[in-house]
Amino acid sequence: MKKLSIQIMALCSVFGFASGVMAEDCKPAPDCAALGFTQNAADCSGTALKCPWDLTKAACKAGVKPVTCAVGSLLGSDKLCYAKEFPSGIKPVGVVFDPANQLAVSPTDAGRTTWASVDWQKQDVSSLTNCTTSNMKTCDVNGKMNTLNLMTGINEQYPAARLAYNYQPDACSGVSFCQKGNWFLPSIRDLITIYDNMAKIDAGLKILNPSTSKEITKSANWSSNEADATTAFAANMDYGRHGGYQKNSEYFVRPVIYYGSACQISNCKTCQSGVTDSCQTCNDGYLELTNFNTNKVTCTQQLSLPCRVLNCQTCVSGDSSTCKICKSGYTLQSGKCVSAGFVCELPSVQRTCNGMKCCCPQGADCSGTAMKCLCQANPDSGIIQ
């Protein structure tokens, strides 16, 4: 009996131990957040220590994610915007001032100089529109195109544009989109936008790189717009005066950059692969023009040749022998103009050639090969060559 009691006690001890173990195994897992695993593992940047009880939680430095571009956002070398810091490997480029047009201002001024050199301070720039104070926000607003147009001259013809074009922040070494040749002199519309949002932009510049970035200089800054032969537009960032200033005055240059992907060349159908400021194919009626100072291609309007079709008001662009619009009283047939009543307009004269009524240029006869007549029975021959 005593032996049986000992066996029963031993058996109970075993079951008691087993139940204790089972009770220990069923305890809830520790709270990962309470142990310091507070980040989602997917958001970690660099080394991460994951929670043993939930591998989706980790102790790490959270990765920096881009934000929607807004005024004052920091522009990174990946063309994305950030709030206060950049991810590892991303360099600071500038501060966004016009998210709608995808424009950012440079971290610093490029310098201080005149808009035009002494020899060119009284010369009108034919490739720029003469803007006025009433259309400053709509006149030649593409600062990139304005700068490229100013760069077609000799080296020191337009110093402000050249200073902006040759600007490159230290952080852009090895970053193709923000290297020298991609920055430009802002339009007066751009400078007005910067002035109107200066508090947010200056706040972004302070974050961008506190040791090197500088706030917008509270003085006159040159734009890429011309007012007339002797004045160009500038904006005073101290008290907000925007208007014409003498081209030989020395003012600050604050370059800006386009961070979008659309072609920025006026009248260009397609830009060259991988760039936004050099044209591959111009629109109809325009020719490719290579700027040998920049090696970039812009589009210039074709010279209109005198229309040589009798009774034609407007010829097809680039083709002086094919009519597009006939004069009043004439109809268009195969690129020629024919009158139902067949009345010759001055200075042409009516002649009879091989039994047909014809309109011929003065001094031309039916047998002439240099001049052709427009005849009633053969309108297709009616072209002055």
Image (cartoon, helix red, strand yellow):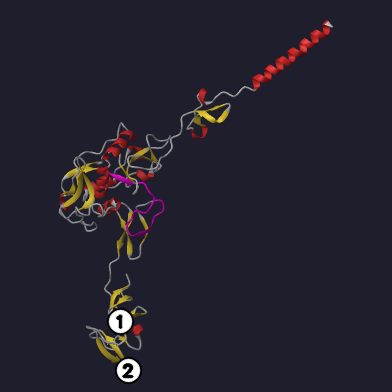
Report if residue 251 is visible in the image.
Answer: yes
As drawn, 244 above or below 17:
below
Q: Amino acid at mark 1?
A: Tyr
**Disc 2 element:** loop
Picture coordinates of residue 29 (x, y %)? 59, 24
Report if residue 187 is visible in the image.
Answer: no
In the image, taking residue 19 as reference, residue 226 lies left or right, namely: left
As drawn, 335 above or below 43:
below
Magenta range: 255-274
- For disc 1, the neighbor class at 10 Å (few under 14, some 14 to 19, many from 20) is some
Picture coordinates of residue 180 (x, y %)? 32, 45
Looking at the image, which is closer to me, 323 or 162? 323
Picture coordinates of residue 143 (x, y %)? 28, 50
Q: Is residue 37 magenta?
A: no
- For disc 2, the neighbor class at 10 Å (few under 14, some 14 to 19, many from 20) is few
Quarter occupied by residue 5: top right
Residue corresponding to mark 1: 330
As drawn, 148 above or below 332:
above
